[in-house]
Image (cartoon, grey):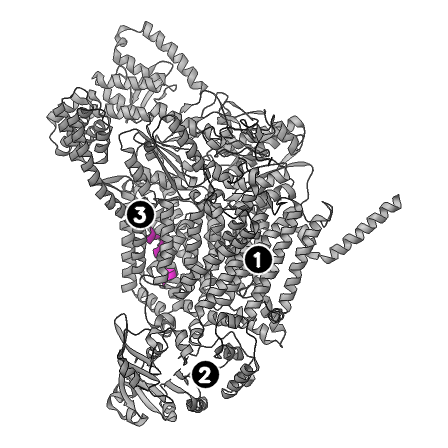
Amino acid sequence: MLTKSTRDRAASFSRRGVLAATAGLMLGLASLTGAKAADDTIKVGVLHSLSGTMAISETTLKDTILFLIDEQNKKGGVLGKKLEAVVVDPASNWPLFAEKARELITKDKVSVVFGCWTSVSRKSVLPVFKELNNILFYPVQYEGEESERNVFYTGAAPNQQAIPAVDYLMKEEKVKRWVLAGTDYVYPRTTNKILEAYLKSKGVAQEDIMINYTPFGHSDWQTIVADIKKFGSAGKKTAVVSTINGDANVPFYKELGNQGIKAKDIPVVAFSVGEEELAGIDTKPLVGHLAAWNYFESIKTKDGSNEKFIKDWQTYTKNPKRVTNDPMEAHVIGFAMWVKAVEKVKSTDPDKVIDALPGIEAPNLTGGVSKMLPNHHITKPVFIGEIKGNGQFDVVWKTPGLVAGDAWSKELDGSKDLIGDWVGKKCGNFNTKTNKCLGSGS
Amino acid sequence: MNVMDTRATSAMLYLDGVHVSFDGFHAINNLSLTLEPGEMRAIIGPNGAGKTTMMDIITGKTKPDEGTVLFDGVTDLTRLDETRIAELGIGRKFQKPTVFESQTVQDNLLLALNVDHSVRGTLFWRGSKAESERIDKVLETIRLTEARNRLAGSLSHGQKQWLEIGMLLAQDPKLLLVDEPVAGMTDVETHLTAELLKEINKTHTVMVVEHDMTFVRELGVKVTCLHEGTVLAEGTIDQVSSNERVIEVYLGR
Amino acid sequence: MTPHMLTRSLDRGATIFLLVVAALGVLIPLFNLLLPAGSFLQVPTYLVALWGKYVCYAILALSIDLIWGYCGILSLGHGAFFALGGYAMGMYLMRQIGTRGVYGNPILPDFMVFLNWQKLPWYWYGFDMFWFAALMVLFVPGLLAFCFGWLAFRSRVTGVYLSIITQAMTYALLLAFFRNDFGFGGNNGLTDFKDILGFNVQAEGTRAALFALSCLALIIGFLICRAIVSSKLGKVLIAVRDAESRTRFLGYRVESYKLFVFTVSACMAGVAGALYVPQVGIINPSEFAPGNSIEAVIWVAVGGRGTLVGAALGAVVVNYAKTFFTSGMLAPYWLFMLGALFILVTLLLPKGIVGTFNAWWDQSKEKRTAASAASAAAEDGVTEPKMAE
Amino acid sequence: MPTKLSARFCSFVLSLFLIAFALPAFAGPFEDAVAKFANDDFSDTEEAVGVIASSGNKLAFPIISALQDGRLMADPDSKKVYVTGTDGKSIDAATGEAVASVPDSASAVRLNNRLRRSVDAALGSLTLQSPDVGTRLQAAQSVFKSHEETALEAVDAALAKESNKSVKTALGEARAAILLFKSDATEVEKLEAVATLKARGDQEAMALLTGMGDQPPSVTKAAASAISSIQSSLAVWSTVQNAWYGLSLGSVLLLAAIGLAITFGVMGVINMAHGEMVMIGAYTTFVVQEVIRTRYPGLFDYSLLIAVPLAFVVAGAIGVLIERSIIRFLYGRPLETLLATWGLSLVLQQAVRTMFGPTNREVGNPSWMSGAFELGQITITYNRLWILCFTLAVFAILLAMLRYSAIGLEMRAVTQNRRMAASMGIATSRVDALTFGLGSGIAGIAGVALSQIDNVSPNLGQSYIIDSFMVVVFGGVGNLWGTLVGAFTLGIANKFLEPVAGAVLGKIAILVLIILFIQKRPRGLFALKGRAVEA
């Protein structure tokens, strides 16, 4: 018995020895990248670009997570263990996102990952998270049309941002004519498809909708702004719904300001322009233009939670001017939910946590309480803010209650019958008409 | 161009009323010149006389604005590109010696051999006895046999000149255009080069551009003096060098 | 490839290189699959995927070295051919998803469904068959390279001008593929692949196999390149690189030579891309980004221009450095490291790693064969004289 | 906003209380209206504005103008509303009595876009007769925009008094606009109105004509013809507009490329870090403005003038540094310079990212750089106009420098024949350093201008490098005029393609055209001919 085992071990050793001899470089390789998993901490992956084009937006989110972890550890960590952040830089390079995700999960053995900004980065890491069964918290407003078991979407779905914004413009500003301007990628495309369908359902005629797409980082807006002006001077109240991507916004707004398009003539409501983007512009010419978010830094709360958060954040970053924005709040909520779920199941095992998360509630920074839904999206309030001269927003409207995020848009033919339900149906894209879980092959 | 008179000329090379100008500067001005088969001709003239430009025109590197350039009495060179012209059998040695510096002497010659120059031909090329013999022979003629495996870049200036002439030989053209073959050569080398060219001239038509009058004299062939892109004088070296204008613009008193 | 070309093409360095690649191709998958997870020598799957990526890059580097190192054509748009090959493979993988897409549409890929496409665009036909896709992997980049090269080389666009218009080419393609109307998934590109030839792309076995395949492709590509550069055609290419007009006056059709290698190298790049996509699991327009192409050229420079081994090595070294720097404490500073690496290499090792090594090796050994001398010299930084002025 | 809700509730209670027990003196409609401001409810505020504007009360103008620029303070608890004067003194809005200080509980009355419009309208009719011509003109225009019937008599009164010509026409147009929408206006009046608007002939006029509801047939007919005539004239103007956009885009391209035309065109150095030089220039501008903001706010309008030389020096110095430390070892190996400078660009980007942070930095437009003016029917924005002039100036200076200055002569000598120049005793290495410095410096200047229309972020340079190379190559390397022509050609072509093909396809088309063009002219638009090229 014992001898046998020893013999086995000996044999295995020798075999291993042979293999080792045949591949020295493998050794070096394994040791170079080999990870030593520390058991006394819980590892949290941070997958945000720190260089390249997306660094502009994502660096802040990296800092946010580090800040939250810091706070949590002050409170004694989770399950009596300290949290440890593992930061990597996917460098705004989509395949690198997948590679880094894989590295985080298999090499660093993280229990959860907070990351991604662009849809494409999410799409690129998706297979990795499915394969290695880990958890991703995705904090950015996106086009919807997705509900995955391993992903939790704490940003706004189209019905939590776009639709309410349009409603506001119809109700408050009596807008009759619409310009849907966006950068040519999937989020604006889908959002505009949804809005187009929605507007038509509200009786807006085709010729009263102008759709325009521009490449990433488009910097010469003269023609388009002029077109908007022209379109807007057809006698009907006109508004621009902008899904223009972060980088192109500054020149866009500068051109708007210079060509003298005032908010009171043609208001622009943007879904990707927050406090951080405005920090790069002189906002005086933009006063009155709108943005729809689930959070604004300027929001005052009864319990002062937002004020406190801003204060702590600015002390943490040692920068009294550092602004906060919506995706940050999404991370705050997501992080809180994850902590609660972990403490609920007394484990960081992804399967347990994933099952525990739906139904978990966490306070958002605007004085409400958000809830994780079975489709892995959360409930959020929607605010419409007007740009102020100081680069902040003045909330002019809010939804009466919290809005539940729809994974699948009701306005699109492809998806109006789909729901995501990971509690009952255990399916992200369940067709309520055919009662079938699509995509499972069968 | 009149067909009759092309037939009339038996010349190996025939230039008539050639004009070319770069941004207004007339490099070649109504240049007419004939080279008989088997002839060796020396071209002299001050800098900017258009000697090299003339060669550019003949080898198809520069297209003349007007004028006739006939090879072998029939082919209009102005319509062809360098490759085609080279294939016709016009070889050229450049003013500043250009050999393939990063390749060995014998590879340089190998590349020059006038065998199949098609992509397929070179891709599936395998050396033949005949080729290597040709190369050996040329190496001997240009006295580089023992340097065959050295990099062309490591050769002395004179040796490069010779290697390039050797490449011409390997190419075995009907007409050789040799631009300043003895520039920067010692007297001995110059003498040897003269001998070499005479040797070559036995079997080829040659056009030599050279400043070195002793060299030209040594060649002892018909001389053409160019000035401002046109023929100033033509004849034996003595006739030309005694020509007033030539002395004035070129030789100096 | 005829046998004599093979034999002729194999010198010492080449043989060692081939052996190493072969060893990697066999051992890494074995160590990954056979050894128990967590055991000391076990190669985690993410490393297999990672090294698979490196190998694909190595093939791309080879293809660039073939035209730049030996023919002096500096293409700053080779990423385009890589990406096109990748897209061809990606389209096949998309069609393999079938009803497993989120909308369960048997024909249309998901991105077409939610952009309300009614039917499959014609250029997607046939990509459900592997052989067709495989053919396209070679054909599409090859065709583009042929047309582009035919225009450019015939009208004697050389040096910087060529480099810049190759940039223009890849940039134009980048913009084109970004457009969602173009029918290639826009910015998101093609992703969420399920299986290839019936094997699950996520499965460890498939990954190992893909890795081995990539190594095989690298070996074959290497042999092809060696065969080309060590043939007489190789000498002509070098001649073109060093003195293009001289070569013309010797009666060579320079443009057809350039066109030939350019097309061959484009096809190689395409294959590299095709192997790359299933291993990284996504192909999207950013692969067309002009920066990528430039970076690929830099791999070659780092490894040693004009030494095929160097090109491959450079690709691996630079990308390993990238992987290494982009995680851990260094993450915020990795661009400094990478940038510094590029500057230092060009300044201190103009011949690249392998080039410098060879030079040193040759010096240390007085006796040298003509062949290695030729190749050693070929590694000199000297480029087209035209551009030197 | 629970806080606001509760505030609104108690204020509501309070207002009931006030209405019930307030002294009759305060019970007038004007006072009630003023009190409404304290309800912090947009529709209440709108009512209040309407009432006050038409009340004829002398306080109306101060109140509403205060509302417009956020100087109207309302105290939700005491229901009192105060006007804080620009001089800091405050008065009670209801009574006009001066008050010592505004209570802390008071906050500025908020506006939204709809309110801003009605405020403008109200102010318009209130200031129609203000002594200042500018204000009157503005007033007339805002009345034209809002065309509220209520303003009609005010307009007529003003028209009667008005002497200034431009204001008169503006008033006339305002009157026409009102009449057009006035249900009980006579057909004649309406026809006149249509004629006036036709004369005005711009998009706003067209907007009114298309927007007017059902009208007597004759009017509709007149309107239709007016619209068509306006449209045809606008069509012509739009071509002019495109040309202008093309020029301004061209100027940006030229500005970005001109530095490259020197480092690349003149020296043959493929400087991939060129874009980063531009970026450095932009960040210099940012720093200058920061200093000015904090230290000497008064100088803000001069910030760019200060930034230009600084940017030139900074970028130029860095350029020289680069040339001395890297480029000079790489002459004769242009492709190696490409690689080294590419590495350099990565380093510079990350350096800026670490120094200034990854996010955009705010670079403000000085007053003379912001806004636009109408030229005929096209809008010309000042920043674009200035950039165009600036670019041409830079180009001219550079050209003159190369042509006439000693260093310029040396530079050209070195370009045309390095060896010869050296043998003639020109210190080529010094010239190289200076040339590269010059190129980089000009890139820096470009950065100053670009900071006015684009992001100031670490990625700024990236977005221009390719375009710059396209321009230089298209125009012909080593030829500044080529660069000029190239830049404007591409700019204009792009702007005429954009409306047809859309921004993305337009850009693609341009790139393809460049590729094909290079086939025709392998050395660009203005290529040097002759032997020198090949040598």
Q: What residue sits 53% from the left and 83% below the top?
A: B135
What chain is tagged by disc 2? B
Kindly identify which residue carries mark 2: B172
Q: Which residue is mark 1?
A: C58
Name the main secondary structure of what is drawn in magenta: helix
Q: CA distance from mark 1 to mark 3?
A: 41 Å
**Three-letter amino acid code of the residue under disc 1:** Ala
* Up-down relation of residue D150 to residue C179 (above or below): above
The answer to whether the residues at label 1 and label 2 have Cβ atoms under 8 Å apart is: no
Q: Which one is nearer the viewer's eye here, B121 or D470?
A: B121
Who's the residue at 46% across and 84% down the image? B169
Amino acid carrying label 3: it is Lys
User: Spatial distance from mark 1 to mark 2, Cα to Cα?
Assistant: 43 Å
> What residue does disc 3 label?
D495
Give above or below for C140 relative to D245: below
User: Could you tell me if residue A53 is visible in this image?
Assistant: yes
Q: Is residue A188 left or right of residue A315?
A: left
Q: Are marks 2 and 3 on the same chain?
A: no
Mark 1–mark 3 CB contact (< 8 Å): no
Q: Is residue B170 left or right of residue A357?
A: left
Q: Where is residue A48 shown, x and y percent of the image?
A: 53, 41
Q: Which residues are magenta?
A: D249-265
Marks 1, 3 in one chain: no
